[in-house]
Image: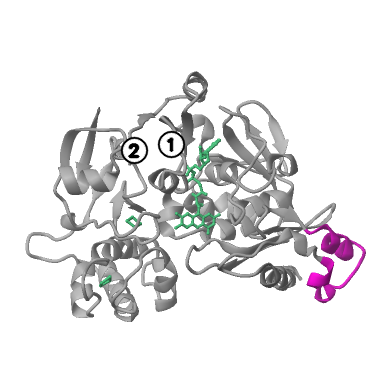
Amino acid sequence: MYELAYSRPESLTEALALLAEDEGAQALSGGQTLMPVLRARLAMPSRLVDLQRLPELAGIRLVEGGIEIGAATTHAEVAASAHVRAVLPALADLAGGIGDPAIRHRGTIGGSIANNDPAACYPSALLALGATVTTSRRTLAAEEFFTGMFSTALEPGEIVTAVRFPACQRAAYIKFRNPASRFALVGAFVAQLPSGYRIAITGGGHGVFRWREAEQHLDGGGAMAAITEDMLDLGHFTGDLHGSAEYRHHIAAVIVRRALSTLA
Amino acid sequence: MTGITLTVNGREHVVEVEDRTLLVHLLRDELRLTGAHVGCDTSQCGACTVHVDGKAVKSCTMLAVQADGAEILTIEGLANGRELHPMQAAFREHHGLQCGFCTPGMIMMAIDIARRHPNPDAATVRAELEGNLCRCTGYHNIVKAVVAGAERMGEPA
Ligand SMILES: Cc1cc2nc3c(=O)[nH]c(=O)nc-3n(C[C@H](O)[C@H](O)[C@H](O)COP(=O)(O)OP(=O)(O)OC[C@H]3O[C@@H](n4cnc5c(N)ncnc54)[C@H](O)[C@@H]3O)c2cc1C
Ligand code: FES
Ligand code: FES
């Protein structure tokens, strides 16, 4: 590991000050993305500001109409939470399928969405459910928060503090897993909200997106079984050594149908 | 350099570390506990698995300074003198290892699995071992060992 400094602030105010005063400083949450990135020297911040124990980022709370999850909540905590199981079981399932047990013991929801890996699981849940992201400065709709692969609306020094989800029993996430990396080769989060169907797809390559054509088809009374990749723009997908764009495009439609069939 | 205090296998250590030191390097190079291995650069192999405050984590994916105040358990802390931990004994009986490189990480993860899933079936063990790679055994005997070891951990001592 290259030379760097580490700070463990006691409060959000102190964390924000540490990030503001040093341009080379970067937030560290569970480290399950950032540590491998640093070891590969793909990024070289001069200081890490550890958010993991900040009280302002902790906890899972039932709120009016849904649930609020602190940014420093680990994947294992979300998977095991009785509150999440009760109001949004699909999210507990999603969190329980991220990586492996050791990754889930340390990786956090805040870190996952701030990173916005184009193959990450959580962003699809936020987008499909219309979640809101609270930061140290503002509240953003998921749609505004995710701005393309590995990119978000976060400004330098801005910290995600919590994510708020609506309660939803009719939701499901299916990950077509890349067996080597454990990330999604393609993943689909589907939800039936009072406003209609919502479908978000991750793993396409350019970042998480909504499949609006399929949403409209379902909202117009179309059959689930009639959803095919013909309604899905191939331009959302890229190919790599794990699978071609056409393969991902096809799999996306298959897993969306599968996820929808679990709601029926 | 930062001064940290941590308990490793029941013993308190007060050490000075560079902020950049990974937990696995503190354990191996400073404390000379070389059971946790480094098998990759990408947080994927699990050879470095230890328990931090009772939970299995990859000690290559955490800074030593992040473990300030924590309780660490490594493979060296499992046996009671010459008496093996039931999970270690199960790995021996079921031939759960060949070269042994992955074994400390496998056993630390196996104990974590047994705590969260008392009497797990083989399918659960396979899913939970997702983050621990073995280049030798083909996993069959590891899975048998974890199932047997978990069963024995559940028996009254
Ligand atoms: C082997 C392996 C398998 C994995 N499999 C999956 C998988 O199947 N699905 C999946 O979705 N993910 C997977 N991951 C990634 C994992 O979920 C990470 O935990 C997650 O992407 C990042 O969360 P973290 O808390 O570890 O963040 P960190 O690594 O600490 O940080 C990630 C980034 O977010 C920034 N950041 C962190 N917290 C905040 C905050 N509160 N506000 C602002 N910025 C912040 C950091 O500065 C950094 O840039 C895997 C990782 C590994 C190593
Ligand atoms: S050395 Fe830690 S996961 Fe491979
Ligand atoms: S026994 Fe050799 S790597 Fe597992």
Quadrant of image for the C terminus of chain B? bottom left
In the figure, is residue B84 to the left or right of A236? Answer: left
Q: Identify which residue is drawn at 11% across, 59% down.
A: B80
Quadrant of image for the N terminus of chain B? top left
Of all chains, the one bearing label 2 is A
- Other-residue count near label 1 (Cα within 10 Å), few / some / many at <14 / 14–19 / ≥20: some
Q: Identify which residue is drawn at 68% across, 49% down.
A: A126
Residue at image mark 2? A2
Q: Mark 2 and mark 1 in contact? Answer it, CB < 8 Å.
A: yes
Percent position of residue B95, x then y? 22, 79
Q: Amino acid at mark 2?
A: Tyr
Residue at image mark 1? A44
Q: Nearer the viewer, residue A115 or B50?
A: A115
- Label total for image: 2
Q: Which mark is residue A175?
A: none
- Residue A201 shows in this picture: yes
In the rendered image, the residue lying farthest to the left is: B82
In magenta segment, residue A48: no
Q: Which residues are magenta?
A: A211-231
